[in-house]
Image (cartoon, rainbow, N blue to C red):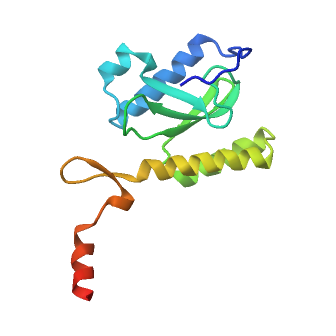
């Protein structure tokens, strides 16, 4: 999932990239989307891709990244990086995430159009993360397909 132009150059040292990937892996271990053994065995089990420019981690000094695990049905979250400082956001805390994205954009003098692009992508990620719910058989369905047990009974009573 790397979208780099032919003349993109890495600007971060491997030590910083590995530190961030390790923190992302730990985050997803805590979220139970990644097993510690897999995270330790494969540091590339996780990804961080810039939300708007699509560069991989290490090719921008600053950026807002989509982070995730290379496996199906794993939620994606947000990482904000400024030089060597970074913070991982649980997208479920959407209010804090959006507030810090706006502050990041103001601090880095990012134009309003690009700021709205970041916000749109994050809102889409939030929607995708929370449209997937397990049913009683352990299969995944989107919210739109899920029928709550009581809703069928209530509508039948009304008719």
Residue positioned 58% across, 11% down in the render:
14
Q: Is residue 31 above or below residue 136?
A: above
Q: Is residue 156 above or below residue 78?
A: below
Q: How many numbered dots are placed on residues in this image?
A: 0
Asked if residue 16 lies left or right of residue 129, the reply is right
Asked if residue 25 lies left or right of residue 64, the reply is left
Residue 30 place in picture, x, y as percent? 36, 34
Residue 94 place in picture, x, y as percent? 53, 52
Residue 132 place in picture, x, y as percent? 37, 50
- Residue occupying the far top of the picture: 14
Residue positioned 31% across, 26% down in the render:
35
Q: Nearer the viewer, residue 74 or 104?
A: 74
Residue positioned 53% across, 25% down in the render:
1
- Residue occupying the far bottom of the picture: 159
**Residue 34 appears in the picture as rendered:** yes
Q: Is residue 16 above or below residue 107?
A: above
**Residue 92 appears in the picture as rendered:** no
Q: Quadrant of residue 39?
A: top left
Residue positioned 36% across, 16% down in the render:
40
Q: Nearer the viewer, residue 134 or 94?
A: 134
Q: Quadrant of residue 44?
A: top left
Q: Quadrant of the C terminus?
A: bottom left
Q: Is residue 10 above or below residue 71?
A: above
Residue 69 place in picture, x, y as percent? 42, 30
């Amino acid at each position: 999932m790397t979208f780099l132009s032919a003349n993109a150059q890495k600007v971060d040292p491997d030590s910083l990239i590995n530190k961030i990937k390790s923190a992302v892996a730990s985050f997803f271990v805590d979220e139970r989307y990644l097993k510690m053994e897999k995270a330790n065995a494969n540091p590339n089990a996780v990804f961080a891709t810039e939300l708007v420019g699509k560069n991989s981690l290490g090719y921008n000094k600053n950026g807002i990244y989509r982070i995730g695990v290379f496996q199906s049905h794993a939620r994606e979250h947000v990482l904000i990086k400024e030089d060597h400082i970074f913070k991982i956001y649980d997208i479920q805390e959407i209010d804090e995430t959006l507030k810090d994205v706006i502050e990041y954009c103001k601090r880095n003098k990012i134009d309003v159009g690009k700021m709205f692009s970041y916000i749109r992508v994050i809102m889409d990620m939030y929607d995708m993360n929370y449209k997937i719910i397990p049913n009683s058989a352990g299969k995944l369905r989107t919210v739109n397909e899920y029928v709550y047990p009581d809703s069928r009974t209530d509508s039948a009573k009304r008719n």
